[in-house]
Image (tube, grey):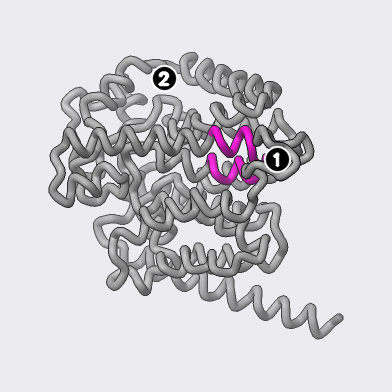
């Protein structure tokens, strides 16, 4: 037993050493991208403190690091860091994201070996390294999704986590649809209360301009013309389709993704449906950046726990060392694969032999 403990400690030390080396090197070589997305949070919070609008009325899509495009409630998260000053605040923000990633891997409801594998594979991946050094909140979203996964049998906690995620970025709102279809009313109510509380706190200090946020999102467009957008509509447009055709493809994609969420909610186990909804929350959007692939660690961990070892190919394909050699299509392909894989593993959605009408039994839907 003691030898096993020593070996486990040695493996853990190696994982942490490799992960730490990758993160440190990624930050040291970030160049002008260091804190790129944090600039948008810091700038919006600074404008708010100065009594100015947090959204640029002349904003348009660009690749610069000043465009704040999140809900006004996102400023609540940025304010404490902004008050520290830009340099200290930026490093504290990066530290928060690294801690969120580590904690997300630690609390996933899977075996210890899977947690360590997720930590290592995620830490050396381009989505994590790039997301952390630009200051994206994707690691924080990963933490919220991992906590929600762990809280599936505690509906009020689950609903609150979905509400928090929705107030940071709109994509997690899709999980409300999944909860409604499953008739998880306690979770829905808890989520709506959480949203109301956060919105009220934000409004009390002056962060309530949702109309400006809606106008801002409308002005900057849906991003289908952006070459680094991994959404299917943007990919189709990048290969010669007109914006009209690309938009139609994107709408069809969104409807299909929502249909899969409905199927998972009505016919699959709770855990399976949750994993599908997490991936769908990203793929249903017309904007899918490559660092969003960090969230695929949720279905990867779910699959590894079920001995689907092939799932390691997803984070391995996104490894930083392979970034110059992997095609950009590796990201959308992995996302769609992780959307569909749960259906292949958990087949409770298929009509059972004893039920000709094709309705799932109560035991199949439970848990």
Asked if residue 111 is positioned above or below residue 322 in the image, the reply reads above
Report the number of numbered marks.
Answer: 2
Asked if residue 179 is positioned above or below residue 89 in the image, the reply reads above
Give whichever of discs 1 and 2 has the lower sequence position.
1
The reply to whether the C-beta atoms of the residues labelled 1 and 2 are less than 8 Å apart is no
Asked if residue 39 is positioned above or below residue 188 in the image, the reply reads below
- Write down the residue under mark 2: 207
Q: Position of residue 201 (x, y in %)?
A: 53, 19
User: Residue at 49% of width from left, 53% of height from top?
Assistant: 338
Helix, strand or loop under label 2: loop
- Write down the residue under mark 1: 151
CA gap, disc 1 to disc 2? 30 Å
Is residue 186 visible to us here?
yes
User: Residue at 52% of width from left, 34% of height from top?
Assistant: 165
Residue 272 forms part of the magenta stretch:
yes
Left or right? Give the position of 17 relative to 352: left
Give the quadrant of the N terminus.
bottom right
User: Residue at 43% of width from left, 51% of height from top?
Assistant: 336
Q: Position of residue 357 (x, y in %)?
A: 66, 32
User: Residue at 60% of width from left, 26% of height from top?
Assistant: 181
Which residues are drawn in magenta? Answer: 262-277
Q: Position of residue 305 (x, y in %)?
A: 67, 61
Give the quadrant of the C terminus.
top right
- Front-most of residues 223 and 92: 223
Left or right? Give the position of 34 relative to 238: right
Q: How crowded is mark 2: few (under 14 residues within 10 Å), some or many (20 or more)?
A: many
| Residue 34 location, quadrant | bottom left
The disc label shown at residue 87, or none? none
Residue 241 forms part of the magenta stretch:
no
């Amino acid at each position: 037993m003691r030898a096993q403990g020593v070996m486990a400690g040695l493996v853990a030390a190696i994982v942490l050493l490799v992960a730490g080396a990758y993160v440190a090197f990624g930050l040291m070589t970030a160049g002008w991208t260091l804190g790129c997305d944090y600039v948008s949070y810091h700038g919006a919070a600074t404008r708010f403190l100065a009594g100015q609008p947090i959204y640029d009325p002349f904003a348009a899509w660009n690749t610069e690091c000043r465009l704040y495009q999140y809900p006004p409630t996102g400023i609540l998260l940025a304010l404490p860091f902004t008050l520290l000053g830009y340099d200290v605040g930026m490093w504290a923000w990066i530290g928060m994201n690294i801690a969120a990633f580590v904690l997300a891997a630690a609390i996933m409801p899977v075996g210890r070996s899977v947690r360590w594998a997720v930590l290592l594979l995620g830490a050396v991946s381009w989505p994590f390294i790039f997301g952390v050094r630009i200051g994206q909140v994707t690691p924080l979203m990963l933490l919220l999704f991992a906590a929600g996964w762990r809280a599936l049998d505690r509906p009020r906690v689950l609903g609150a986590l979905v509400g928090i995620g929705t107030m940071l970025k709109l994509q997690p709102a899709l999980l409300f649809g999944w909860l409604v279809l499953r008739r998880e009313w306690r979770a829905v109510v808890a989520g709506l209360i959480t949203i109301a509380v956060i919105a009220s706190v934000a409004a009390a200090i002056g962060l309530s301009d949702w109309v400006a946020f809606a106008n801002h999102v409308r002005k900057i467009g849906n991003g289908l013309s952006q070459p680094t957008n991994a959404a299917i509509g943007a990919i189709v447009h990048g290969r010669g389709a007109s914006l009209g055709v690309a938009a139609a493809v994107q709408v069809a994609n969104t409807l299909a993704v929502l249909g899969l969420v409905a199927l998972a909610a009505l016919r699959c186990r709770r855990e399976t449906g949750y994993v599908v909804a997490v991936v769908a929350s990203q793929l249903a959007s017309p904007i899918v950046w490559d660092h969003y692939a960090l969230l695929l660690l949720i279905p990867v961990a779910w699959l590894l726990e079920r001995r689907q070892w092939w799932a390691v190919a997803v984070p391995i394909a996104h490894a930083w060392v392979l970034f110059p050699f992997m095609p950009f299509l590796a990201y959308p392909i992995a996302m769609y694969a992780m959307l569909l894989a749960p259906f292949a593993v958990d087949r409770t959605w298929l009509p059972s032999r004893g039920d000709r009408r094709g309705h799932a039994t109560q035991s199949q839907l439970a848990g």
